[in-house]
Amino acid sequence: MDIRRVRTWIAAALAALLVCTGARAAEAPAKVVMAEIAAHPALWTVHGPKGTAYLFGSIHILPPNMRWHSPKIDAAMKDADTFVFEIPMDDTTKAQVMDFVRANAILPQSQTLPGLLDDKARKDYEAVLALSHVPAARLADKRPWYALLVLELGYLMQRHLSPDAGVDREVYRDAVAEGGKEFRAFETPEQQFRLLMPADRTLEIDEFDEGLKELLHDQGSLGNLIDAWADGNAKRLGRLMNADIKSDPKVEKALFTDRNRNWTNQIAGMLDEKHTYFITVGAGHLCGPGGVPAMLRAKGFKVDGP
């Protein structure tokens, strides 16, 4: 199972909030001129007793030349008075992120990250540092779970993908520019960070070692997810996500099923309020029989969409 793809799906949602912690300290790749890519992502509409919700799937990290706005999506954004995201998108959460990183991402003074690794893992680590252009000094005192997050993001940046071009960031910027909008979030940054933090330190090092190998042998799997999203092909996107998580029920439950159920319950409550919501979450959470739209249908809500 390519668990790194699932990890990156979550990690990219945190990327913009990690700017202030130095996580994106990778050397930026040289700018290249790229033709615009037209995307046509899916949009769902949920009708409640008092409210209406549009469900829009985000790819949290995208090529900066991808254009996904359409008359239908723009009309839904204009219609909405309340925008909902996985985590708060405003700058006030950055201080919380910095506090969490200081408390949970720093090794004891007697340890260094390279010192935790065996010879083979250390060789892989040096190769990924070169691949991602992340300075070794930036990660020397960091715990493996956090270092892997930084390396993944650095690697994706070298492939000309940017968290600043992520759908949720762009939706938030557009909503702020429009003015007069309310903002809500399903989770806190700390809740999402903890999804990436093994409680067992031995497991943490093992996952770091495995993550290094997956980065070194990446076959562009995230590109397939982006392509399916851009085509508005929710079924294909769901199949790609399910291929990664079905072999590990614990991962599926923690990263998707439990969270989807929690978000569905929150949306059900929102729809009993007289608001129009534009809800932007990772696109994988909206696909398949365990996705949020299916869970809302099971609760008796009318859901229009793919």
Image: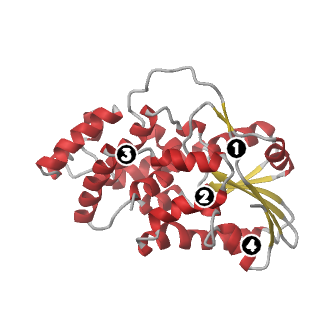
Q: CA distance from mark 2 to mark 3?
A: 20 Å
Q: CA distance from mark 3 to mark 4?
A: 39 Å
Q: Secondary structure at mark 1?
A: helix
56 left or right, relative to 195: right
Q: Position of residue 80 (x, y in %)?
A: 82, 52
Neighbours of disc 4 within 10 Å: few (<14), some (14-19), many (20+): some
Neighbours of disc 2 within 10 Å: few (<14), some (14-19), many (20+): some
Q: Which mark is residue 268?
A: 4
Find disc 1 in the rendering and name its residue: 171
The numbered mark, 1 or 2, whose residue comes first in the sequence reads 1
Q: Secondary structure at mark 3?
A: loop
Q: Is residue 59 above or below residue 135?
A: below
Neighbours of disc 3 within 10 Å: few (<14), some (14-19), many (20+): few
Q: Which mark is residue 236?
A: 2
Find disc 3 in the rendering and name its residue: 218
Q: Name the amino acid, label 3.
A: Asp
Q: Position of residue 149 (x, y in %)?
A: 38, 48
Q: Quadrant of the C terminus?
A: bottom right
Q: Position of residue 258 (x, y in %)?
A: 54, 73
Q: Name the amino acid, label 2.
A: Arg
Q: Nearer the viewer, mark 2 or mark 3?
A: 2
Q: CA distance from mark 1 to mark 4?
A: 22 Å
The numbered mark, 2 or 4, whose residue comes first in the sequence reads 2
